[in-house]
Image (cartoon, grey):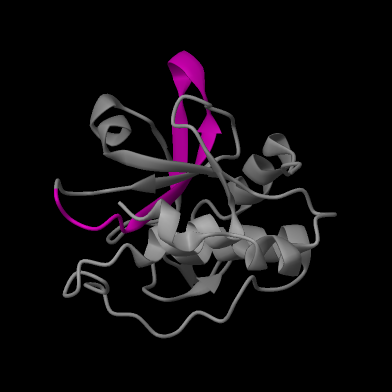
């Protein structure tokens, strides 16, 4: 399956820089969380939401130790090998060893000057160096499908359970 243009994804994500962190929000300039940033880029690429996102608490998925975010990413995005670095990739992070993966970002640059564009509590959307501590937390890498992809068919054909960790 073809992927979206990584440079275009990065350009869209960078428009969000400075948007304040707001839990469960996804409105450029007004507020967003890490999932809201991915949702906002998705809406710009495809003109609509991938799916309705139910309300979630800051500790969602932890009580049942379910990889909800990983499953959703594998449903709507294209899984990649961790070694297949490209600008525009969606990065999934596990913030603590043994915890569920619950943070997302977009690779801004790759290589020696690697960066990640993301929103996290206490900060606006920022582009940070993808330092070794951040790199060690990456557990999943995904690409946005090409905008001309039949997204309903793509999501229906995914086997979410195979991406559980």
Residue 152 percent location from the top left of the image: 73, 69
Q: Is residue 63 magenta?
A: no
| Magenta region | 98-118
Residue 67 percent location from the top left of the image: 32, 62
As displayed, is residue 81 above or below residue 53? above
- Residue 88 sits in which quadrant? top right
- Residue 60 seen by the camera: yes
As displayed, is residue 137 above or below residue 72? above
Residue 143 or residue 38, whichever sits in front: 143
- Residue 19 seen by the camera: no
Residue 165 percent location from the top left of the image: 30, 51
Residue 126 or residue 44, whichever sits in front: 44
- What residue appears at the point 70 percent right and 35 percent down from the top-left corner? 7
Residue placed farthest to the bottom in the image?
55
Side of 39 where 72 appears, left or right:
left
Labels in figure, total: 0
Q: Is residue 104 magenta?
A: yes
Residue placed farthest to the top in the image?
112
- Residue 155 sits in which quadrant? bottom right
- Residue 11 sits in which quadrant? top right
- Looking at the rendered image, the quarter that the N terminus falls into is top right
Side of 58 where 149 appears, left or right:
right
- What residue appears at the point 77 percent right and 48 percent down from the top-left corner? 146
Side of 43 where 14 appears, left or right:
left
As displayed, is residue 151 above or below residue 27? above
- What residue appears at the point 45 percent right and 38 percent down from the top-left corner? 116
């Amino acid at each position: 399956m073809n992927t979206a243009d990584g440079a275009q994804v990065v350009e869209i994500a960078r428009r969000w820089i400075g948007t304040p962190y707001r839990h469960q929000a996804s409105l450029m300039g007004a507020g967003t969380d890490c999932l809201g940033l991915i949702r906002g880029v998705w809406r710009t690429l495809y003109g609509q939401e991938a799916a309705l996102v139910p309300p979630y608490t800051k500790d969602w998925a932890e009580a049942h130790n379910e990889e909800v975010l990983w499953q959703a990413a594998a449903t709507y995005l294209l899984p990649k090998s961790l070694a297949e670095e490209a600008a525009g990739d969606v990065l999934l992070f596990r913030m603590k060893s043994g915890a569920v993966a619950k943070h997302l970002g977009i690779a801004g640059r790759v290589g020696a000057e690697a960066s990640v564009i993301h929103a996290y509590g206490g900060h606006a959307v920022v582009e940070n160096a993808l330092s070794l501590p951040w790199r060690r937390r990456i557990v999943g890498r995904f690409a946005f499908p090409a905008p001309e992809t039949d997204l309903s068919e793509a999501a229906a054909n995914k086997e979410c359970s195979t991406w559980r960790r």
